[in-house]
Image (cartoon, rainbow, N blue to C red):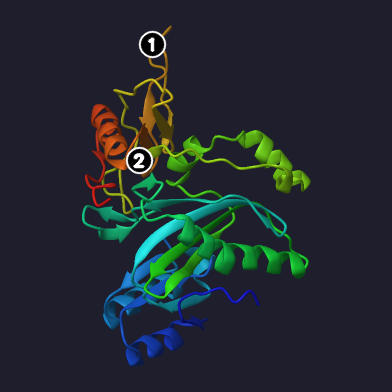
Amino acid sequence: AANVPTAAAEVFHSAGAAIGYVESATPPFVVKADGLAAGKGVIMSETPDEAVGAINSMFVSRDFGSAGDTVLIEQWLRGQEVSVFAFVDGPYVSEMTAACDYKRAKDGDLGLNTGGMGSYSPPPFWDDELERRVRAEIMEPVAERMAEIGCPFQGFLYAGLMITKEGPKVIEFNCRMGDPEAQVVIPRLKSDLLELALCTAEGTLSEQKVEWSDDSWVGVVLASDGYPGGYETGFEISGLPEDSEECVVFHAGTKLGEILETNQNAKIVTSGGRVMTAASRGKTISDARLSAYEIAGSIEFGNVYYRGDIAADV
């Protein structure tokens, strides 16, 4: 085993066993669907009743499909959550960087969990000592162990961590970039992304240096009001700025609408819950945040909604 630090957890394959556990254990709980669930398969449960509802949503109503066939109930870790990213080529782990995202739908971290409502990078607390610990205790042991067992990983490795009083602990791993973290991490990449991807695939990543800029980036997700629950789509989007080195609007839940008149360009309309991310650069997180919200405020569609507190607590 790689012996990486993580939360204590129990695994369940039926609603009855899981409910029996939460009714006898001490809350709070984190209930996780053990599979891909569009970033929404983790339900924070302050009470046993909330945990029972989460368990039933996975096993009984099948809200997450086959991802809910197996359910983990974990210790609720307290601390600062952070997403850490590196290119990995077998046992080799590149220079890392980090970002913080906001998963709850509403200001003040209220409402349901979402795929992410905004992010910023780099976090002020991400220093050389924390990076050293994450590399030594988590990223390298995982990469080395996967290589040892004949499953070497090549690609982006994304570790979702909680920085607790005892140190960094793993919440989850993903074999991809994050969303919305990619929107504030990739613009900070000084090295050539295509070259790094090619070297990772060809097994020569260790010959490259992955360089990250010191610039600060903040991204604000513009969503369809009602997300992550029900929402309407098809609203025309206006006020989109031109992309530049200082700001980028990343499309997600958008599409081209119908062309109603000859010689008229198709309009861009909404087609999903998270519609786009307004991302901006600054010398500080505060500067980048101000610019990102200026962009977000200029974009309009019928049921636009976004959190007003992204990176406000930095």
Residue at 34% across, 93% down: 24
Give the residue type at disc 1: Glu
Prevalent SS, magenta region = strand
Which of pointers 1 and 2 lies earlier in the amino acid sequence?
2
> Mark 2 highlights which residue?
218
Q: Is residue 170 visible in this depiction of the protein?
A: yes
User: Relative to 229, is 93 on the left or the right?
Assistant: right
User: Relative to 231, is 145 on the left or the right?
Assistant: right
Give the residue type at disc 2: Val
Q: Say what secondary structure mark 2 lies in.
A: strand
Relative to 68, does residue 221 appear above or below in the rendering?
Answer: above
Q: Is residue 222 visible in this depiction of the protein?
A: no
Residue at 63% across, 63% down: 140
> Mark 1 highlights which residue?
261
User: Relative to 2, is 254 on the left or the right?
Assistant: left
Does the segment drawn in magenta span residue 118? no
Residue at 45% across, 88% down: 17
Q: Residues within 10 Å of mark 2 (few under 14, many from 20)?
A: many
Relative to 302, does residue 79 appear above or below in the rendering?
Answer: below
Task: Specify the segment rendered in magenta.
Answer: 217-221
Q: Position of residue 309 (x, y in %)?
A: 23, 47
Q: Residue 306 versus residue 173: which sits nearer the camera?
A: 173
Relative to 249, does residue 106 appear above or below in the rendering?
Answer: below
Q: Position of residue 67 (x, y in %)?
A: 52, 66
> Residue 2: which quarter of the image?
bottom right
Relative to 39, does residue 241 appear above or below in the rendering?
Answer: above
Residue at 35% across, 56% down: 103
Mark 1 vs mark 2: give the one in front: 2
Tell me the CA gap for discs 1 and 2.
38 Å
Q: Residues within 10 Å of mark 1 (few under 14, many from 20)?
A: few
Q: Position of residue 85 (x, y in %)?
A: 53, 52
